[in-house]
Image: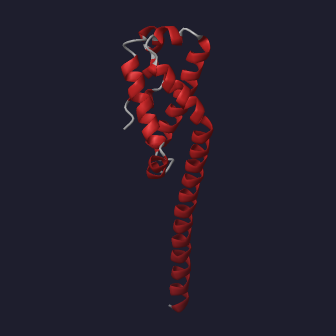
C-alpha cells in the first residue's frame, strides 16, 4: 500500500508542478508581449502625434489627399488594431497597458476616426473594415 501511495503522490505532485509551470509560463509570455507593445508604443509615439495633427486639421480631406498622410494614418491605425486584437485575445496585460497610456491612445484614435469619418468619408469610409477589432474597442 505504501508503494501505491508513493506512486499516487508522485503522479499528483508532477501534475501540480506541470500546472504551476504552465501558469508561470503563460504569465511570462503575457508580460513579454506587453513589454514589446509598450516598447513599440514609445517608438511610435511621434507618429501617433502626427496623426493627431492630421485629425485636428480643418480641411482633413485636403490633408488626407497627400499620400504620406494617409499612409501614416493607416500605419498607426494598423498598429492600434494590432493592440486591440491582443487585448481582445487576452494576450497582454491590459491594466499595465492602461497605466502606460496605450489604451487611452487607442481609444482616442478610435474616437478620432469615428468623428473624422463624416468629414473625410472618401478616405475613411472603409476604416472599420481595415480595423474591425478597433471599432468596438473599450
Query: Measured along the vertical axis of the image, is residue 100 above or below residue 115?
Result: below
Image-quadrant location for residue 41: top right
State the colouring used for the structure image.
secondary structure
Q: Position of residue 136 (x, y in %)?
A: 37, 31
Q: Quadrant of the C terminus?
A: top left
Q: How many marks?
A: 0
- Rendering coords of residue 133 (x, y %): 44, 31
Q: Residue at x 38, y 22 (%)?
A: 114
Residue drawn at point x = 54 percent, y = 57 percent: 26
- Residue 128: image location, x then y, percent: 43, 22
| Residue 23 in the image: above or below residue 137 | below
Residue 115 in the image, given as x and y percentages of width and height: 36, 21
Which one is nearer the viewer's eye here, 75 or 85?
Answer: 75
Q: Residue at x 40, y 18 (%)?
A: 116
Which of these two is toward me, 136 or 22? 136
Q: Is residue 84 above or below residue 19?
A: above
- Residue 123 can be seen, yes or no: yes
- Residue 100, compared with residue 118, is above or below; it is below
Please say whether residue 129 is visible from this viewpoint. no
Between 16 and 54, the residue placed more toward the observer is 54
Q: What residue appears at the point 62 percent right and 16 percent down from the top-left corner?
A: 68
Amino acid at each position: 500500500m505504501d508503494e501505491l501511495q508513493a506512486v499516487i503522490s508522485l503522479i499528483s505532485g508532477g501534475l501540480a508542478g506541470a500546472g504551476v509551470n504552465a501558469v508561470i509560463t503563460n504569465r511570462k509570455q503575457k508580460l513579454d508581449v506587453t513589454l514589446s507593445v509598450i516598447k513599440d508604443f514609445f517608438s511610435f509615439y511621434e507618429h501617433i502625434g502626427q496623426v493627431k495633427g492630421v485629425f485636428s486639421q480643418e480641411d482633413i480631406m485636403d490633408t488626407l489627399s497627400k499620400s504620406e498622410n494617409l499612409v501614416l494614418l493607416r500605419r498607426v491605425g494598423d498598429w492600434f488594431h494590432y493592440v486591440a486584437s491582443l487585448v481582445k485575445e487576452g494576450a497582454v496585460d491590459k491594466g499595465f497597458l492602461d497605466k502606460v497610456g496605450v489604451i487611452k491612445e487607442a481609444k482616442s484614435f478610435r474616437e478620432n476616426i469615428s468623428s473624422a469619418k463624416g468629414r473625410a468619408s472618401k478616405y475613411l469610409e472603409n476604416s472599420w473594415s481595415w480595423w474591425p477589432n478597433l471599432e468596438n474597442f473599450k
